[in-house]
Amino acid sequence: MNHELNQVAKSFQSIAHSIAADVDFWTLRLTDEKHESISVRQGVMQPVYNQQARGALLTFVIGDGCGYAATSDLSVSGLTKAAGQASEWAKQSAGLSLLTASDYPRPENTAFYETPVKESWDNLALNEKISLLQDANKALKINDNIVDWQAYLGRRCTDTLLTSSAGAHIEQRFHYIHPGLEAVANKGSITQTRTGGGSQSSRQGGLEQLELLNFPGEATTLAEQAVALLSADECPHGKMDLVLAPSQMTLQIHESIGHPLELDRILGDERNYAGTSFVSQDMFGSYRYGSDLLNVTFDPNRSEQLASYAYDDEGTPAQREHIIRNGILQRPLGGNSSQARTQMQGVANARQADWFRPPIDRMANLNVEPGETPVADMITNIEHGVYMETNRSWSIDDSRNKFQFGCELGRVIKNGELKGLVRNPNYRGISATFWRNLAAVGNADSFQVQGVTNCGKGEPNQAIYVGHASPTCHFSDVDVFGGAV
């Protein structure tokens, strides 16, 4: 329990009757965040990054109008000033809103949620963390071909408290861990990079997550791969089978399933900034998004995943839902407000990136569910193809339909066997066609939890944490190409 946030909430509640007398409904969302990050690059300790942020977002509903105001001044006078601003915006928006008074979320639950942590960040002293990163740097610098190398480790702790005029009191505390390793190799005009050790796999939890992310144990392997890629052949090109590791499935899910299914994007709210979607409202319930093997869930209840929570930021209880079942599109990624606009069933995914931003429809944990195929059997059934892992580059059109993605590492698959490395592996396609060509889904043994920490959306921009998890997957008839094409 964050006692400071609770005290602020009590202070506001004591004055709410006087400063919000004409308000039909209000919510107060308080946030307290602490960040710390440590990095050692080329054996040199970088400045330690520390940040703390605390603030409040007030939401007032007056008639059919809704107004927001944010403030970092959590005194009675600061909250009173913010309340006046929220009230004024609510009155001005009346008659202009897409929603009616009854459409706005009115949370009334009482709850507490905290990320399970087995080993606290504070259990390891700063000098011990630095020593860990120095050792990782030594393991990364395997020879003179490694021209840049670094290891980093960070954490974020976020406390939130949502209260309302209906009596809601929802406290949530999230613990995030952010490790990573990077090795850059060069020879002449060729440069190759390998990242890992959690660099694209941030999680919730404590230091116990490091071993699960192979940090820093993966350091030497990553450096060896970066050097080996310097002399590897270019990725072959042509239509062929493609096998994607979970580290690349993260990006594939994010861009060609997650963003197209955000309901506010489908409604056109994002078209002037982040684009629209090739998906329309009438597709849900019947549209074949992928092959029968494709099962995608919105799962905010997997505690170690990056975007797990008990309630979204509008106070809606979060539960696991199928977004795509056996290839058929089921429901959009739309929170309470978007559901009210469309009369569609969505999910609890109204999320706020910072204390001074209102919640909007966002991905949370969006996962491809495991299938039944061991990866070895998957490879055995492929005559000619490429295996790829770890995203390096991405490009996708404004409707999240046509895409082109590149990876750090590739391996040729020939006659049912994984062969040598290839560099600069890329592939492209069209979202629905690509997912309909899903030929095999790995079993639970290949299922991995990943995460994205920089998903941008909204005006002004909101960068937020998103979780993805997936097994290794096999796609047929994919346009694959290398850097020389």
Image (cartoon, rainbow, N blue to C red):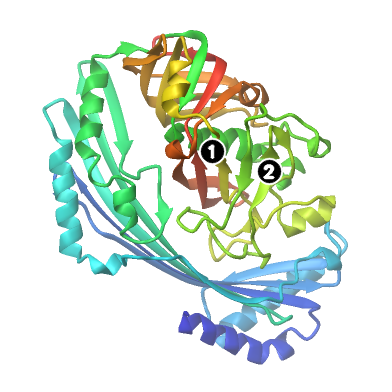
Q: Amino acid at mark 1?
A: Pro
Tell me if mark 1 has few (under 14), some (14-19) or many (20+) residues whose alpha carbon lies within 10 angstroms of its own.
many
Q: Which quarter of the picture shows residue 376?
A: top left
Could you tell me which secondary element the residue under label 1 belongs to? loop
Residue denoted by label 2: 323
Mark 2–mark 1 contact, CB under 8 Å? no
Vertical placement of residue 252 versus 311, above or below: above
Earlier sequence position, callout 2 versus callout 1: 2
Q: Amino acid at mark 2?
A: Ile
For disc 2, the neighbor class at 10 Å (few under 14, some 14 to 19, many from 20) is: many
| Looking at the image, residue 484 lies above or below residue 140 | above
When the figure is inspected, residue 458 is found, relative to residue 281, above or below; the finding is below
- The percent coordinates of residue 286 (x first, y second) are 80, 34
Q: Position of residue 389 (x, y in %)?
A: 40, 29
Checking the image for residue 370, the label placed there is 1
Residue 15 shows in this picture: yes
Q: Mark 2 falls on what kind of element?
A: strand
Residue 67 or residue 423, whichever sits in front:
423
Q: Residue 79: which quarter of the image?
A: bottom right
Q: Quadrant of residue 189?
A: top left
Which residue is at 79% across, 39% downward? Answer: 284
Task: Note whether residue 172 is visible.
Answer: no
The residue sitting at 37% across, 15% down in the picture is 417
Relative to 183, is 477 on the left or the right?
Answer: right
